């Protein structure tokens, strides 16, 4: 079997132990004689998986009782319009903090639904930083304030979150959910596509505060209401059962690793290896993000010339590194060091970066 170092930005690496466990159960899930993909979503065997995934996420993130965990579809991209449809009502403003392409896309969708404003933006410096709290501009009639917690394309991440009290704080955490502890109570709504840290693509997790579930949303189509999914435990229609099964296995793996605190410690160790290779290169490698805004999940950098970028990436591919190409809008290189990327892969990349620089 070919072994590679998987630094893909998403869908991303999954824990090897999870893949092996899924492989062992693929044809016969817990004595049913069927794959979990073949089970009815109303069956006892599947409902146990479904509920266990909800319970594990609540446990790992210490989610308070007044929040509901929902399993949705459509990715984070559908969430860009799903929550404004419910909360961006006439006379209210959707307020957005822009830190990259995904927050721009979220704003674009909201503009189709109602009035929007920009609370703060780091676009002027090519999204190399996170805006300062002191620069935020709020409005009395904010329906919510939206941010993107980690920026896969530019390699920046919120080090800490603002304490916002005048409106619900909504966060797209698709690319760093479960990578570090958070205070869920700071947020009214958290949403995340699974394909970075939670499992394979196909399921989207939403963590919604109860007061947001009590609002009148009769104007919203049934499938696009959080209420619909909260009232039916995310079983209003057939959910993406295999993706949720894999999510449950990944959450189990996180717990086995020692929980989110242990995962964060390892993520910091992994990222430091690569950032040190950048910082100790005497300018040969240039990181895109300012140091105080650096992401633990996506490390973006360039070499002195485009030709050297190409040479670096070509040789990396020969050596078994996968997914190191930077996003087309930024170029250069990007190493996505999500939870399941092992320390060994980051050590190998660090060593390759050092050897390429000194050749």
Image: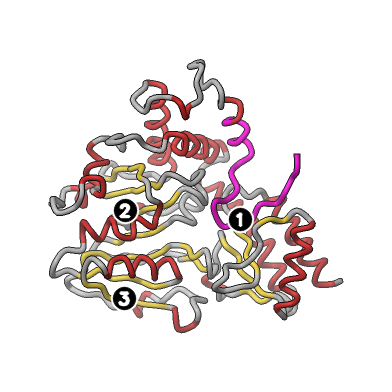
- Find disc 3 in the rendering and name its residue: 119
For discs 1 and 3, the disc positioned in front in the rendered view: 1
Q: Residue at x 56, y 48 (%)?
A: 263
Q: Up-down: is 20 above or below 282?
A: above
Crowding at label 1, few (<14), some or many (≥20) Cα neighbours within 10 Å?
many
1 or 3: tag closer to the N-terminus: 1
Q: Is residue 298 magenta?
A: no
Secondary structure beneath label 2: helix
Q: Residue at x 65, y 68 (%)?
A: 333
- Give percent across and percent down for residue 351: 78, 61
- Find disc 2 in the rendering and name its residue: 185
Q: Which residues are magenta?
A: 1-22
Distance CA(mark 1)–CA(mark 3): 31 Å
Q: Up-down: is 260 above or below 87?
A: above
Secondary structure beneath label 1: loop
Q: Is residue 8 magenta?
A: yes
Q: Which mark is residue 66?
A: none
Secondary structure beneath label 3: strand
- Give percent across and percent down for residue 220: 19, 52
- Give percent across and percent down for residue 128: 52, 76
> How many badges with numbers are in the image?
3
Query: As drawn, is 163 to the left or to the right of 166?
Result: right
Q: Up-down: is 118 above or below 78?
A: below
Q: Residue furthest right?
A: 359
Quadrant (top left/top right/bottom left/bottom right) for the N terminus: top right
Residue 263 visible here: yes
Quadrant (top left/top right/bottom left/bottom right) for the C terminus: bottom right
Distance CA(mark 2)–CA(mark 3): 21 Å
Distance CA(mark 1)–CA(mark 2): 31 Å
2 or 3: tag closer to the N-terminus: 3
């Amino acid at each position: 079997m070919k072994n590679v170092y998987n630094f893909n930005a998403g869908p991303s690496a999954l824990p090897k132990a999870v893949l092996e466990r899924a492989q062992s159960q693929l044809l016969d899930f817990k004595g049913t004689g069927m794959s979990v993909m073949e089970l009815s979503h109303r069956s006892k065997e599947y409902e146990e998986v479904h509920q266990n995934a909800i319970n594990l996420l609540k446990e790992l993130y210490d989610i308070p009782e007044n929040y509901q965990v929902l399993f949705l579809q459509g990715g984070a991209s559908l969430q860009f319009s799903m929550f404004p449809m419910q909360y961006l009502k006439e006379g209210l403003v959707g307020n957005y903090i822009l830190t990259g392409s995904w927050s721009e896309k979220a704003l674009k969708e909201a503009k189709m639904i109602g009035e929007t404003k920009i609370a703060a933006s780091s676009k002027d410096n090519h999204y190399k930083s996170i805006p300062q709290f002191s620069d935020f501009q709020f409005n009395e009639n904010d329906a919510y304030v939206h941010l993107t917690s980690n920026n896969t394309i530019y390699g920046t991440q919120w080090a800490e979150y603002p304490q916002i009290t005048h409106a619900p704080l909504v966060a797209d955490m698709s690319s760093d959910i479960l990578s570090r502890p958070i205070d869920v109570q700071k947020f009214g709504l958290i949403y995340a596509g699974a394909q970075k840290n939670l499992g394979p693509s196909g399921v989207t997790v939403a963590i919604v505060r109860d007061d947001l579930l009590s609002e009148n949303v009769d104007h919203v189509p049934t499938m696009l209401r959080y209420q619909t999914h909260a009232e039916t435990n995310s079983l209003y229609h057939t959910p993406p059962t295999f993706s949720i099964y894999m999510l449950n296995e990944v959450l189990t793996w996180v717990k086995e690793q020692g929980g989110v605190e242990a995962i964060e410690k390892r993520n910091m160790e992994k990222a430091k290896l690569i950032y040190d290779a950048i910082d100790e290169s005497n300018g040969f490698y240039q990181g895109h993000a300012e140091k105080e805004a650096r992401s633990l999940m996506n490390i973006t950098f360039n070499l002195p010339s485009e030709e050297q970028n190409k040479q670096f990436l070509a040789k990396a591919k020969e050596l078994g590194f996968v997914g190191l190409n930077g996003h087309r809008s930024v170029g250069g290189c990007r190493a996505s060091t999500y939870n399941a990327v092992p320390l060994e892969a980051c050590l190998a990349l660090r060593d390759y970066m050092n050897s390429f620089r000194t050749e």
